Amino acid sequence: MRTGSIGAVILIIWLLLGGVAAYERGYFKDDGATSCAETGTVLVTVVAGPLNWLGINPKIKCDVPAPSK
């Protein structure tokens, strides 16, 4: 029972730090051009942002095939 509450506190702190990381990168500025890609970037930053402060720099490579002609 106690392990679950400790895990929840760690998760909340982790997400708060991720929110700070996204804020530092300027992702919360309202420039009027919100897209699904931008929302995805913000979400990934919130989840993985604290890893950068730990010295880990996760990279995601997204290869999209060209449309057929």
Image (spheres, helix red, strand yellow):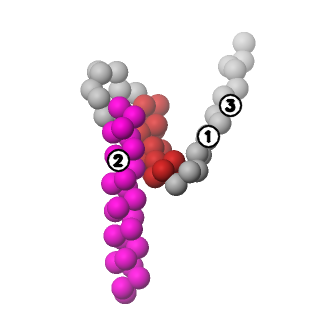
Which percent across, then down, holds residue 29?
29, 29
Marks 2 and 1, the one that precedes in the sequence: 2
Q: Amino acid at mark 1?
A: Ile
Disc 3 + disc 2, Cβ < 8 Å: no
Q: Quadrant of residue 39?
A: top left
User: Is residue 48 visible in this depiction of the protein?
Assistant: no
Residue sitting at x 31%, y 34%: 28
Circle 1 residues within 10 Å: few <14, some 14–19, many ≥20 = few
* Residue 57 falls inside the magenta stretch: no
**Which secondary structure lies at badge 2?**
helix
Q: Amino acid at mark 3?
A: Asp
Q: Which numbered tag is attached to residue 63?
A: 3
Q: Amino acid at mark 2?
A: Gly
Of tags 2 and 1, the one toward the viewer is: 2
Q: Which residue is mark 2?
A: 19
Distance in Å between CA atoms under marks 1 and 3: 10 Å
Circle 2 residues within 10 Å: few <14, some 14–19, many ≥20 = many
Q: Residue 58, relative to residue 33: is it above or below? A: below
Residue sitting at x 39%, y 50%: 18
Which percent across, then down, holds residue 17?
37, 53
**Which secondary structure lies at badge 3?**
loop
Image quarter hosting the C terminus: top right
